Amino acid sequence: RSPASIPRRSRRRKTLAVAYESEQGAGAEQGVSEPQRPRWEPRNWRQQLEHIREMRRSRDAPVDEMGVQKCYDSSAPPKVMRYQVLLSLMLSSQTKDQVTSAAMLRLRQHGLTVDSILQMDDATLGQIIYPVGFWRNKVKYIKQTTAILKEKYGGDIPRTVEELVQLPGVGPKMAHLAMNIAWDSVSGIAVDTHVHRITNRLKWHMLFFIPLSSCIRKLMFSSHCRDLWREINWLLVGFGQQTCLPVNPRCNECLNQDICPAAKRH
């Protein structure tokens, strides 16, 4: 066969899709029955959890001081507040908390409402949110999503994960955080890079996630440990920002050093 006839192997990175549970149970609307809850639990995981809670007690990580829950105007009308929560989540993707917080402050100084964003031209919006990651795409997504909210939801944001993820630029992580912060409803775990990294390092992944298919690499939230869903993102994001770093984790400062499977012991 000639080189031209040989199909090229895709070099695109495989992404990890995360399914979410409805009120009636995970996978109910997708025709997928939840696998039986695993009985296996990682060794020492409850002690590790208590240690992480202790290390996070001071609440002084970037996510605590400049995270999405700090970016909206808490004195604004509820509908405006929820819109600002969603917008801050859209800006936060691939962006440090400090940069997102600064961008949200600039937006709020211009009056951050559905109508003000719709009236703002793309160039001005881009200048305000720069240098958030992928800011050009976010200008487009913010305008598209805001128009949908105005037309379909009366300027409010959807009340379900299923509807939220249909909005341009809104993924499952943002949807679950929006449900938690804006609607005070726990719909699942917001899985970001910190949650993914730390649950794998501690071998916690089977506590919170159930593989649906090795082919499509989907995960479904396990009902096991559901009582931890609300706090697990907040705990692990801050822990990942301060101690369990992606590169050169500060194992010597970690209370779990002696019981962590991934700890560097010197």
Image: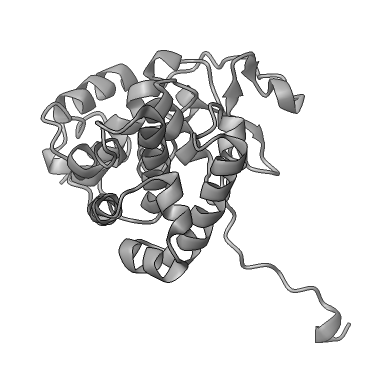
Residue situated furthest right in the rendering: 1
Q: Residue at x 50, y 63 (%)?
A: 137
In the rendering, at what x and y percent does residue 31 appear? 77, 24
| Residue 74 visible to an observer of this rendering | yes
Q: Residue at x 30, y 54 (%)?
A: 107
Instruction: Tell me the quadrant of the picture where the N terminus can be found.
Output: bottom right
Coloring scheme used? one colour
In the rendering, at what x and y percent does residue 6 appear? 82, 77
Out of 160 and 54, give the one closest to the viewer.
Answer: 160
Left or right of 159 on screen, residue 214: right
Out of 46 and 242, give the one closest to the viewer.
Answer: 242
Q: Residue at x 25, y 50 (%)?
A: 101
In the rendering, at what x and y percent does residue 43 appear? 36, 21
Q: Vertical placement of 146 versus 133: above or below?
A: above
| Residue 19 visible to an observer of this rendering | no
In the rendering, at what x and y percent does residue 176 appear? 47, 32
Left or right of 245 on screen, residue 121: right
Q: Quadrant of residue 18?
A: top right
Left or right of 228 on screen, residue 260: left
Q: Vertical placement of 111 versus 135: above or below?
A: above
Give the mark count: 0
Out of 115 and 6, give the one closest to the viewer.
Answer: 115
Q: Residue at x 39, y 45 (%)?
A: 113
